[in-house]
Image (cartoon, rainbow, N blue to C red):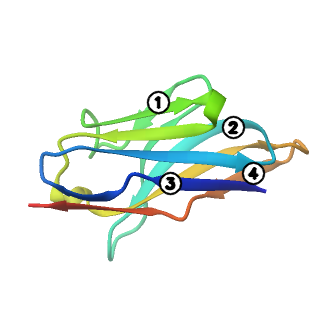
Amino acid sequence: QVQLVESGGGLVQAGGSLRLSCAASGSIFSINALLWSRQAPGKQRELVASITSAGRTNYGDSVKGRFTISRDNAKNTVYLQMNSLKPEDTAVYYCNAQGLDANRKFFNSWGQGTQVTVSS
């Protein structure tokens, strides 16, 4: 099993910054993609950013130019640096990892979520 633990959420004023972290642990052979998604109350979960094992990144239109995703492969950790935060960024942020476990079986694991609240 692969577990993901997120940290770094909290309350911040509009225009401020937060950095989310997500550490993967357990029976891991390799992690291919690492993703951050978010879900605001009453809305569907949306993809915020993703990064491949090769470092290729992709961002949702609403966060381009403000958020940066990065990863530390040695630590099996992914980060989301969020700058110029807006009230509409308020949501629960979820980390997602996809890869192969020690038995070379595909896994798709999610973290428990971390709340980000941006006040106006």
Q: Residue at x 60, y 58 (%)?
A: 110
Determine whether the residue tagged by mark 3 lies in a helix, strand or loop. strand
**What amino acid type is highlighted by mark number 3?**
Glu
Vertical position of residue 93 compared to residue 81: above or below? below
Select label 3 or label 2 by which is in front: 3
* Nearest-to-viewer mark from 3 and 1: 3
Name the disc covering residue 31, or none.
2
| Disc 4 residue crowd, few under 14, some 14–19, many 20+, Cα 10 Å | some
**Residue nearest the viewer, comparing 119 with 49:** 119
Element type at mark 2: strand
Q: Return the disc, 4 or 3, that comes first in the chain's sequence.
A: 3
- Three-letter amino acid code of the residue under disc 1: Thr
Is 69 displayed left or right of 72 in the figure?
left
The location of residue 44, given as percent across then percent down, is 40, 68
Local crowd size for mark 2, using a 10 Å CA cut-off: few (<14), some (14–19), many (≥20): many
Residue 51 in picture, x, y percent from top left: 52, 34
Q: What residue is pinned by disc 4?
A: 107
Callout 4 amino acid = Phe
Q: Earlier in the sequence, mark 3 or mark 2?
A: 3
Farthest right residue? 103
Task: Say which of 71 and 108 sits in front.
Answer: 71
Mark toward the start of the polypeptide (3 vs 1):
3
Residue in the image at 20% along x and 48% along y:
85
Give the CA distance from mark 4 to mark 3. 18 Å
Residue beneath disc 1:
57
Indicate the secondary structure of the residue bearing disc 4. Answer: strand
Measured Cα–Cα span from mark 3 to mark 2:
16 Å
Q: Is residue 81 left or right of residue 4?
A: left
The residue singled out by tag 3 in the image is 6
Q: Provide residue 30's location: percent of width, then percent of height.
A: 75, 35
Q: Earlier in the sequence, mark 2 or mark 4?
A: 2
